[in-house]
Image (cartoon, grey):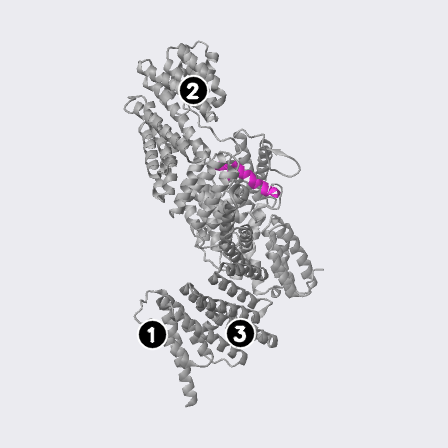
């Protein structure tokens, strides 16, 4: 059934199963393979199958199953140690450590049995000649777990003092354990310093840096290092997500979400792993998981979301409140089982502390999409500093203060007055007029009748100027609703009335300016309507009328005001109108200057929040003019001046614009910070799928530029869940997939990288310009090749080559042909087809060089490179064919032949030659191939020589390759001449140049080798 008929087939099956994802399916296959091994009647086969079964159990949620195969292995060792080879004997002793940890993690195993096992482990390690380092590490784990701190300290010191040997855990795992102890002792900074080599990639293993990244999250948050914590979460979760055995590390990431205001992401993590609620094979990690589930659910309940439906154990639906109670019971019961076994309260104390943690950040933006489970807090107006419960009179005074000084939230303050005095009860006409006026402003077109009511009340209160101003405001609202002509007719009459009233000193500047400004605003609406219909006399007339009206505002208010900020605000708005008019007439420079003056006017008046709109305009004009520094200054000012008063969607837009400018200015680190803020505020505004996706796409690109590939991949995958060609444009989607492919390639996930690049190429194939399509097809081919999918890679390179040919891009066409040649050599098409493709690449280069207008230097580089690679291909193919023949005739010699002519081809052969001396090639087929390779290499030398200084290093590299071939062909004098030629061209060159130094050293070695061969030949002849 399985096809396993011999030991070799079993070993292949065991290796294949080792590459499968962790989990029950892999475990079940290991059980089948053990049954197959038992049929072979080979003791070592059973031993290896048991070792494999033990390993897959250990790296799964079924850790409790590993004790049985280990007991059997130990019995086999005690009965017949000679059946174990060196590797299996080492593995048996290695997994003693797994047994120690495994027993500790199972609360039903008595502590006495664990202590007895420690003694057994120490005894067997001593007999085998191993250091006590691993034993003391295991003892430390037991002492720390049960809370015996003095013993833990002693064991910790003994662990570090003992010699590292073959039984010591890898450096990464040891550092993780040591750092975790520092955290336990309250030394977060020391822990992070211990973990630094793992976090920086100096040490790694199958489960590191996965667990170190997870363990570092809470310490980083406690130390206020939130940027690192965010990065570790994104990078680390990507590593643990596919690994079923890492429930404890997974729990750390859920905990991080609960502590940073990312409750919604925490729920997403729970939904991804429903089995973690119920898998019982590893009680200790289940305890950690249920503790952080409790923490997260308590947090949701505290936010008023106890009734929200959440992911939980299968078989029923759960609310946050219900799951909190369930998880707390489960965690508490498990902790009590451990404490009963241990005879101490240590586990329960730690779990209770973990469940009762308070958030360490109100909201830490992560960059990935998440929907806030609770509404974002609304910025409320500052409460008036009034004793007791404010009455209507106090509220009225506060509302007047806010509106007179043009403060944010003035409308809300007037609404509070209206609620305190329904229908204006007890208020004089002036106050009732102001209430109606401000309610009308808040309601827009629906408030038009209220403006008229306000006007009547202002008149009744003896303020005819403000009555005219209220009606002028109503006219402007009608213009905003599209009734520009009617509004203009109304405001013109009001304008005449107020000027007459002002001339008779019947009203003041403030009321008059309000009417004059309303007229200017309506005339500006007419300008925009005329501009939308197209240029012409009507548009010109509209601009002239508006400009005159605006200048009239300036003439009226400039120099007025004193303590009143409104005249200054009118002047600033008027300058902004003039800026708009300048922009509409094509004077961008003057428009920018006027917008700057308008913004400065608001800031000087103490009204910076009004400046934001115009600073954004300055930024846009600066960007348009190529003044990126000016755009950056304006956007920074807008963010500073907007403060908390800009709505979330506006803040998202400002941060995103600044991120894009900083990105172009080659400041990706700060650009990433602003893109992250943009994504956060877009989520707050409910724009996750639109503006948020765009921000995430940009953030992913900036992280990629910074070399933070895992974080970038997480963010880009999150963005792509929302990006669509219909909403965002296919260009944005293509770029996101392109970047994601780059990230995945850097992470070694080549198949996934190919998928993203192929999807991007498919979108780009419809574009009129096909450069991106061709590039993506070529990159996809590279990824497919790196993933070991040679046939698919060949097809993708062929597709890319056709596109490059259509575009007239010969260099990349040639590269695709060379890549196909190497694929053919290693595939079914074989050496003949590979040589034909390489020859075609040479012809394409030569034909392009013969054509007029070609970039001769670039083409010459490609031609020289092609000749060089052609030579390597010829050499490698000959050696591999000879190796295959030798293997067929003398299998026992295969290992040596592979060492001499393996994957490194001619370069490996060159190393062998340098190490063993130079001898001529005698096999006729190989000799013919080497002669052909020498011809190609000589051509490469000539091509690179023609490039002068630009081709110097390439020329000398080819010259030395030719020298090696000459030597292989038994012509040491010619090899010597090649070496001397290299030394001659580098005479006087700077030896600090690494390439110069390497070339000189290789040439010297070649000369020495040829001298030795010549001397040997002379001795033989003598």
Looking at the rendering, the stretch of residues picked out in magenta corresponds to 256-276
Most distant residue in the front direction: 537
Image quadrant where one finds the N terminus:
bottom right
Q: Is residue 385 above or below residue 534?
A: above
From the image, tell me which residue sits under label 3.
879
Residue at the spot x=32%, y=19% of the render? 509
Image quadrant where one finds the C terminus:
bottom left
Residue 386 is left or right of residue 773, and the answer is left
Q: CA distance from mark 1 to mark 3?
A: 32 Å
Q: Is residue 400 above or below residue 670?
A: above
Camera sees residue 899:
yes
Q: Earlier in the sequence, mark 2 or mark 1?
A: 2
Name the mark nearer the viewer: 2 or 1. 2
Q: Is residue 915 above or below residue 260?
A: below
Q: Position of residue 817 (x, y in %)?
A: 52, 65
Pick the front one: 189 or 615: 615
Q: How many marks?
A: 3
- The reply to whether dot 2 and dot 3 touch (C-beta < 8 Å) is no
Most distant residue in the right direction: 1
For disc 1, the neighbor class at 10 Å (few under 14, some 14 to 19, many from 20) is few
From the image, tell me which residue sits under label 1.
984
From the image, tell me which residue sits under label 2.
490
Q: Earlier in the sequence, mark 2 or mark 3?
A: 2
Residue at the spot x=48%, y=63% of the render? 810
Q: Position of residue 586 (x, y in %)?
A: 37, 38
Residue 696 inside the magenta-drawn segment: no
Toward which corner of the image does residue 578 lie, by quadrant? Answer: top left
Pick the front one: 76 or 328: 328
Camera sees residue 412:
no
Secondary structure beneath disc 3? helix
For disc 3, the neighbor class at 10 Å (few under 14, some 14 to 19, many from 20) is many
Most distant residue in the bottom direction: 1022
């Amino acid at each position: 059934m399985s096809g396993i008929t011999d030991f070799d087939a079993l070993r292949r099956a065991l290796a294949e199963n080792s590459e499968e994802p962790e989990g029950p399916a892999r475990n079940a296959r290991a059980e089948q393979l053990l049954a197959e091994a038992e049929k072979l009647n080979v003791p070592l086969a059973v031993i290896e199958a048991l070792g494999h079964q033990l390993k897959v159990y250990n790296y799964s949620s079924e850790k409790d199953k590993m004790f049985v195969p280990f007991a059997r292995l130990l019995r086999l060792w005690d009965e017949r140690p000679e059946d174990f080879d060196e590797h299996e004997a080492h593995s048996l002793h290695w997994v003693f450590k797994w047994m120690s940890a495994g027993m500790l993690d199972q609360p039903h195993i008595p502590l006495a049995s664990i202590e007895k096992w420690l003694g057994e482990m120490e005894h067997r390690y001593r007999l085998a000649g191993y250091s006590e380092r691993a034993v003391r590490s295991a003892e430390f784990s037991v002492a720390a777990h049960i809370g015996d701190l003095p013993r833990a300290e002693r064991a910790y010191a003994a662990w570090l003092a003992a010699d590292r040997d073959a039984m010591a855990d890898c450096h990464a795992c040891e550092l993780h354990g040591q750092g975790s102890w520092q955290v336990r002792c309250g030394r977060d900074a020391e822990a992070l310093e211990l973990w630094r080599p793992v976090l920086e990639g100096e040490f790694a293993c199958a489960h590191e840096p996965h667990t170190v990244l997870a363990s570092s999250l809470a310490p980083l948050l406690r130390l206020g290092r939130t940027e690192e914590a965010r990065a570790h979460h994104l990078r680390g979760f990507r590593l643990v997500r596919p690994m079923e055995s890492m429930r404890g590390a997974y729990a750390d990431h859920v905990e991080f979400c609960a502590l940073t205001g990312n409750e919604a992401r925490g729920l997403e993590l729970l939904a991804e792993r429903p089995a973690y609620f119920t898998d019982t094979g590893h009680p200790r990690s289940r305890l950690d998981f249920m503790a952080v589930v409790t923490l997260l659910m308590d947090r949701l309940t505290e936010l008023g979301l106890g009734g929200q439906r959440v992911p939980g154990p299968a078989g029923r639906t759960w609310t946050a409140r219900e799951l909190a109670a369930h998880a707390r019971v489960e965690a508490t019961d498990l902790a009590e089982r451990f404490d009963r076994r241990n005879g101490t309260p240590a586990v329960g104390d730690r779990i209770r502390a973990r469940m009762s943690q308070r958030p360490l950040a109100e909201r830490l933006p992560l960059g990935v999409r998440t929907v806030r489970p609770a509404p974002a807090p609304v910025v409320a107006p500052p409460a008036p500093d009034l004793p007791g419960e404010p009455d209507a009179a106090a509220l009225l005074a506060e509302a007047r203060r806010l509106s007179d000084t043009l403060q944010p939230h003035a409308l809300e303050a007037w609404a509070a007055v209206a609620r305190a005095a329904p229908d204006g009860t007890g208020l004089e006409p002036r106050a009732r007029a102001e209430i109606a006026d401000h309610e009308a402003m808040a309601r827009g077109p629906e408030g038009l009748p209220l403006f008229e009511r306000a006007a009547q009340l202002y008149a009744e209160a003896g303020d005819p100027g403000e009555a005219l101003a209220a009606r002028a405001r109503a006219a402007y609202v009608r213009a905003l609703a599209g009734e520009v002509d009617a509004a203009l007719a109304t405001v013109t009459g009001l304008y005449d009335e107020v000027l007459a009233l002002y001339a008779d000193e019947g009203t003041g500047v403030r009321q008059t300016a309000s009417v004059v400004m309303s007229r200017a605003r309506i005339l500006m609406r007419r300008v925009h309507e005329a501009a939308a219909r197209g240029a012409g006399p009507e548009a010109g007339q509209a601009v002239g009328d508006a400009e005159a009206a605006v200048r009239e505002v300036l003439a009226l208010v400039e120099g007025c005001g004193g303590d009143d900020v409104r005249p200054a605000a009118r002047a600033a708005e008027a300058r902004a109108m003039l800026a708009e008019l300048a922009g509409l007439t094509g004077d961008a420079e003057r428009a920018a200057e006027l917008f700057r003056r308008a913004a400065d006017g608001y800031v000087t008046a103490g009204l910076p929040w009004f400046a934001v709109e115009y600073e954004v305009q300055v930024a846009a004009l600066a960007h348009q003019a190529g003044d990126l520094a000016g755009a950056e200054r304006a956007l920074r000012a807008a963010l500073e001046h907007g403060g908390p008063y800009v709505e979330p969607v506006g803040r998202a837009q400002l941060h995103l614009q600044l991120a894009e400018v900083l990105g172009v200015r080659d400041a990706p680190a700060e650009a990433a910070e602003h893109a992250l803020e943009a994504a956060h505020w877009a989520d707050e505004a409910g724009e996750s799928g639109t503006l948020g996706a765009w921000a995430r796409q940009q953030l992913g690109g900036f992280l990629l530029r910074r070399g933070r590939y895992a974080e970038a991949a997480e963010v880009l995958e999150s963005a792509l869940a929302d990006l669509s060609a219909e909403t965002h444009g296919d260009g944005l989607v293509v770029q996101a997939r392109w970047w994601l492919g780059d990230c995945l390639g850097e992470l070694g996930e080549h198949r996934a990288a190919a998928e993203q690049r192929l999807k991007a190429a498919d979108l780009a194939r419809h574009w009129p310009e096909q450069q991106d399509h061709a590039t993506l097809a070529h990159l996809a081919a590279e990824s497919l090749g790196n993933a070991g999918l040679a046939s698919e890679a060949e097809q993708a390179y062929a597709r890319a080559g056709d596109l490059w040919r259509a575009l007239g891009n010969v260099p990349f066409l040639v590269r695709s042909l060379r890549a196909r040649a190497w694929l053919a050599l290693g595939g079914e098409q074989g050496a003949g087809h590979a040589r034909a493709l390489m020859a075609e690449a040479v012809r394409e280069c030569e034909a392009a060089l013969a054509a007029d207008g070609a970039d001769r230097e670039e083409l010459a580089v490609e031609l020289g490179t092609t000749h060089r690679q052609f030579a390597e291909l010829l050499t490698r193919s000959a050696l591999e064919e000879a190796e295959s023949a030798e293997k067929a005739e003398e299998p026992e010699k295969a290992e040596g032949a592979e060492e001499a002519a393996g994957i490194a081809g001619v370069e490996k052969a060159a190393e062998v030659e340098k190490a063993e001396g130079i001898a001529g090639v005698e096999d006729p087929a190989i000799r013919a191939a080497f002669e052909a390779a020498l011809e190609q290499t000589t051509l490469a030398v000539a091509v690179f020589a023609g490039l002068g200084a630009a081709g110097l290093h390439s020329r000398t590299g080819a010259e030395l390759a030719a020298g090696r071939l000459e030597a292989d062909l038994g012509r040491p004098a010619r090899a010597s001449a090649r070496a001397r030629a290299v030394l001659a061209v580098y005479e006087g060159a700077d030896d600090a140049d690494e390439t110069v130094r390497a070339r000189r050293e290789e040439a010297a070695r070649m000369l020495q080798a040829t001298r030795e061969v010549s001397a040997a030949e002379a001795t033989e002849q003598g």
